[in-house]
Amino acid sequence: MLHSIPHGGKLINRILRGKDRELSELKAKELKKLQLNKREISDLEMIATGAMSPLEGFMGRDDYNTVVDTMRLANGLPWSIPITLSVKEETANDLSMKEEVALVDGEGNSLAVMLIEDIYSHDKEKEAIEVYKTDSPEHPGVKQLYDSGPILIGGKISLFHRPRHKDFIQYRLDPADTRKIFQEKGWKRVVGFQTRNPIHRAHEYIQKSALEIVDGLLVHPLVGATKGDDISAEIRMRCYEALFENYYPKDRTFLAVFPAAMRYAGPREAIFHAICRKNYGCTHFIVGRDHAGVGNYYGTFDAHYIFDEFEDGELGITPMFFDHTFYCKRCTSMASYKTCPHDSSEHVTLSGTKVREMLKNGVTPPPEFSRPEVAKILIEAMSVNKE
């Protein structure tokens, strides 16, 4: 029996099957259509599969307001990020309460039916300050917020067509799938690791340190929309596969993808990522430095401190906090500021900018920083991009 109970007590499933699916698909042809952006499509899929349990649809105003103000749903359950569907004013004027609408992707393919339970406007500046801690349009999450429509539509969704994915098919596992796999493996304590970057030695050290005290590790890279200069999910997945092939114990580790879009909301997103991984069956969650951060908007350990705003056990998943990690030449091993007594001149650390520069020039970073298999994949990818 797994020790991880879904957030709110049960795993939500809003995917229609059989006759219900056929009827909804037919009905959608006659309904008004709302086109979703990439992030909203990711959110729709995650609501439907239970990754965002206990949500059953896009948030109405009560949940939205309490999440923005207090990091809780209206019923008091912890939740840190608004999950919303925005529309233009003229679109909203044509909609009414208790009306059903079809939700469609960028190509106009119908994915789901939604029952409208709320139509309300949102204060974008307030949401920016509370959720992202800045109102700067330079922040990618804030920019997306400012670019969204002024009116929000809330209501329960019923999905009849999964969004079309051509990539990572074998790794696209729903919460019900990962829970079943952990159960079959006999893992009672599972630690989740969120990433949107290639895994370097420092990340590997953190993961393996966590693995010492649990039964299994879920490496769960985010593959939804990210900002343009992030390394593509396809290249990152090849890096993860190389690590799993050569350096990770096959019976204690598992690789699957997380279909969420990045919001770059720093501390608030760390809470959101932890709650989602709880729904996937994790009992523990690794929170590194500047989790889900971007630029200099958040303090180095703000994503650690935010967990103190919840009572012990209230989130239902145990955060594992890690300090800055590196290779120490004096210790002759990977270490962190918590474990290494030596001066930083002994530490092998490279900035992201420096690493990118080395890789672009075909220079392999030192083995204390990156596994050679990972460096090779990144160098090849960057030389292709240069051509």
Image (tube, rainbow, N blue to C red):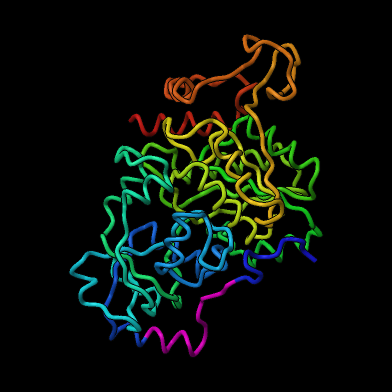
Q: Quadrant of the N terminus?
A: bottom right
Task: Classify residue 301 by image quadrant.
Answer: top right
User: Which stretch is magenta?
Assistant: 12-25
What residue do we see at 65% from left, 23% from top? 326
Q: 269 or 364, which is in the foreground?
A: 269
Vertical placement of residue 12 versus 370, above or below: below
Say above or below: 7 vs 199.
below
Horizontal arrangement in the rendering, residue 237 relative to residue 279 (left or right): left
Relative depth, front residue between 322 and 305? 305
User: Where's residue 128, x and y in %?
Assistant: 36, 47
Q: Which residue does the image show at 44% across and 38% down from the upper left?
A: 231
Would residue 337 be counted in the magenta stretch? no
Indicate left or right for 293 with 104 as reference. Answer: right
- Give the total number of marks visible in the rendering: 0
Percent position of residue 236, x then y: 52, 41
- Residue 227 position in % (x across, y down): 38, 42
365 in relation to 276, above or below: above
